Image (cartoon, rainbow, N blue to C red):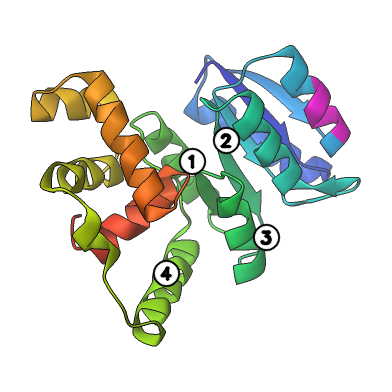
Amino acid sequence: MNHVLIVDDLEDARELLNELVNAGFPQAVVTIADSVAAARTAIAGRRFDLALVDLSLGDGFGTEVIALLRQRQPACMAVVASIHDDDERLFAALQVGASGYLLKDQPAELTLRQLQLIADGQPPLSPAVARRLIQHFQGRQQSEPGPVVEEALTPREREVLGLLARGFTLTDIARQLEISRYTVGDHVKNLYRKLDISSRAQAALHAQRFGLT
């Protein structure tokens, strides 16, 4: 992670996130934004590898920043850093393209470990958020009987989904399955389309639901 964007309107939160990023990625150049407007300016001027975005900002919502990153810098991993874990904010963030969701009230050591796992392609999810997501999808499965989406996946797509959920990069998956990276990319695109998802975090949840992890 060479360039990291932190978007938060609270000074204490910005300082803590900055300390954690410096500890996890000593070589990273960190850009600080305290509003949606400041984030827009930063995104227009620099390419980022990682963005840590609060959802409640003084002049708008973090989902606006995440959506902009998905549009302008799709290679950037946008991760929510928030005190809120309610379904409305959680799923709104995932829907616009968030690749992870961290809670500010969890121990700093846990947040640091999860940030460091990003380098290995693992989507960072606070344990409480992961449990909420699993409960949500389990509830949907029980209340909405019908054909299981898993059946629409080919055996190769199931393999790719399992490896993707376990944090493998596209290059690693290609090496593991002895296929080209471009073929893996095509499989990932098909998976995202069939499962109607847009991030690794969502892929990991489906893989767990299908028993692939």
Give the Cα separation between the discs numbered 3 and 4.
16 Å
Query: Crowding at label 3, few (<14), some or many (≥20) Cα neighbours within 10 Å?
Result: some
Label of residue 83 in the image: 3
Q: Which residue is mark 4?
A: 131
Q: Nearer the viewer, mark 1 or mark 3?
A: 3
Give the Cα separation between the discs numbered 2 and 3.
17 Å
Q: Quadrant of residue 21?
A: top right
Give the Cα separation between the discs numbered 1 and 3.
16 Å
Q: Which residue is mark 2?
A: 20
**Residue range of the region highlighted in magenta in the rendering:** 37-41
Residue 209 in percent (x, y) is at: 28, 65
Q: Confirm whether the magenta stretch covers residue 40.
A: yes
Residue 140 in percent (x, y) is at: 42, 78
Q: Nearer the viewer, mark 2 or mark 4?
A: 4
The three-letter code of the residue at mark 4 reads Arg
Q: Quadrant of residue 106?
A: bottom right
Label 2 residue SS: helix
Left or right: 70 with respect to 126? right
The three-letter code of the residue at mark 1 reads Leu
Q: Nearer the viewer, mark 3 or mark 4?
A: 4
Label 4 residue SS: helix
Q: Quadrant of the C terminus?
A: bottom left
